[in-house]
Amino acid sequence: MRPVIPYVTAALLFGLGVFGVLRRRNAVLVLMSVELMLNAVNLILVTADTTARAVLPHSGQVFALFVIVLAAAEIGVGLAIVLQLYRLRATVAVDDVPLTESPDPVGGREPATLDSEAGR
């Protein structure tokens, strides 16, 4: 079997996923692009397993299964974060996500120090 077609397809899928991650502003579409990249890696692992079977039998399929499990966990955590972001900000735009903590603490209180928490 010539593995050129699956490798080229995987490269195209991975490139499309990278483009989606770098270009999209919607968090759900970014997660879909990450899934495209993970599927491209799975395609490479399975193709490599079928072409080099004598070295380590079924190792590519085991790694592909592991990547599928990680992708499912990533989608679960990622969608939970996106839903929480939508509840707080009413948008899922990635550009609107604050990356640093605001200097004004919640409730207008000063942050507690270790001495005040210990009762000193």
Image (cartoon, rainbow, N blue to C red):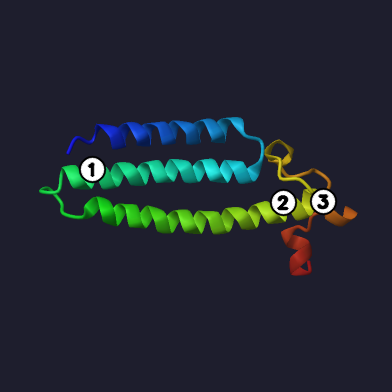
Judging depth in this view, the residue of 110 and 98 nearest the camera is 98
* Residue 106 drawn at (x, y percent): 83, 54
| Marks 2 & 3, CB-CB < 8 Å contact | no
Q: Nearer the viewer, mark 1 or mark 2?
A: 1
Q: In which quarter of the view is residue 107 placed?
A: bottom right
Q: Amino acid at mark 2?
A: Leu
* Residue 32 drawn at (x, y percent): 54, 45
- Few, some or many C-alpha atoms within 10 Å of disc 3 (few <14, some 14-19, many ≥20)? few
Image quarter (top left, top right, bottom left or bottom right) of the N terminus: top left
Q: Quick check: 38 left or right of 29?
A: left
* Residue 69 drawn at (x, y percent): 42, 59
Dot 2 falls on a residue whose secondary structure is: helix
- Nearer-N-terminus badge (1/2): 1
Q: Amino acid at mark 3?
A: Pro
Per the model, the C-alpha gap separating discs 1 and 2 is: 39 Å
Identify the residue at image location x=58%, y=41%. Answer: 30
Per the model, the C-alpha gap separating discs 2 and 3 is: 19 Å
Q: Quick check: 32 left or right of 4?
A: right
Identify the residue at image location x=31%, y=41%. Answer: 44
Q: Which residue is mark 3?
A: 105
Dot 3 falls on a residue whose secondary structure is: loop
- Few, some or many C-alpha atoms within 10 Å of disc 1 (few <14, some 14-19, many ≥20)? some
Identify the residue at image location x=36%, y=57%. Answer: 66
- Nearer-N-terminus badge (2/3): 2
Residue 85: which disc? 2
* Residue 22 drawn at (x, y percent): 56, 31
Q: Amino acid at mark 1?
A: Ala
Q: Which residue is mark 1?
A: 48
Dot 1 falls on a residue whose secondary structure is: helix
Per the model, the C-alpha gap separating discs 1 and 3 is: 53 Å
